[in-house]
Amino acid sequence: MTALVAFFAHGLRANNTTVHAALDAGVPVITNWDEGTPHDLRRVTHDYRTDLAPVLPRPSVSPYTWDRLLKELGCASGPSAAVA
């Protein structure tokens, strides 16, 4: 997952072109807000202090593991096999 993480001394402002470019590309933006952050930007960005749940990846089980790769390559698996 790709996201833009951008922090500002006084919070996100409407004139930040990097944030607008990320939003136009569909990339989630994690930033910091303050009282000067426009409400329309608050609706489409995530404040790192309060609003990360929709952005952070959820744990998932992947079929692609090191053990599977080693097995398919015909190698022994496990920590001792890597040293031998």
Image (tube, rainbow, N blue to C red):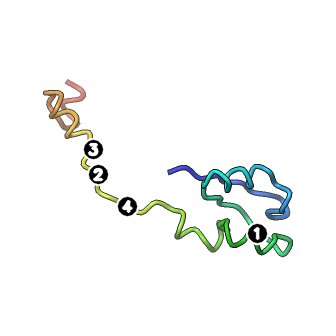
Judged left or right of residue 12, residue 1 is left
Tell me the number on the disc at residue 9. none
- The residue that mark 2 highlights is 62
Work out how far the residue at label 4 is from the one at label 2, CA to CA, in angstroms: 9 Å
Work out how far the residue at label 3 is from the one at label 2, CA to CA, in angstroms: 5 Å
Q: Earlier in the sequence, mark 1 or mark 4?
A: 1
Q: Earlier in the sequence, mark 1 or mark 2?
A: 1
Residue found 20% across the figure and 40% down from its top = 68
In this orientation, which residue lies closer to the viewer: 22 or 80?
22
Q: Amino acid at mark 2?
A: Ser
Q: Is there a contact, CB below 8 Å, between mark 4 and mark 2?
A: no
In this orientation, which residue lies closer to the viewer: 41 or 77?
41
When the figure is inspected, residue 24 is found, relative to residue 34, above or below; the finding is above
Q: Secondary structure at mark 3?
A: loop
Which residue in the rendered view is the most extreme toward the top?
A: 84
For the image shown, how many numbered marks are present on the structure?
4
Work out how far the residue at label 1 is from the one at label 2, CA to CA, in angstroms: 35 Å
Residue found 67% across the figure and 56% down from its top = 23
Q: Is there a contact, CB below 8 Å, between mark 3 and mark 4?
A: no
Q: Position of residue 82 (x, y in %)?
A: 24, 29
- The residue that mark 4 highlights is 59
Which class describes the residues within 10 Å of circle 3: few (<14), some (14-19), or many (20+)? Answer: few
Residue found 14% across the figure and 31% down from its top = 76
- The residue that mark 3 highlights is 64
Residue found 13% across the figure and 27% down from its top = 74
Work out how far the residue at label 3 is from the one at label 4, CA to CA, in angstroms: 14 Å
Q: Position of residue 50 (x, y in %)?
A: 63, 74
In this orientation, which residue lies closer to the viewer: 49 or 80?
49
Q: Position of residue 8 (x, y in %)?
A: 80, 58
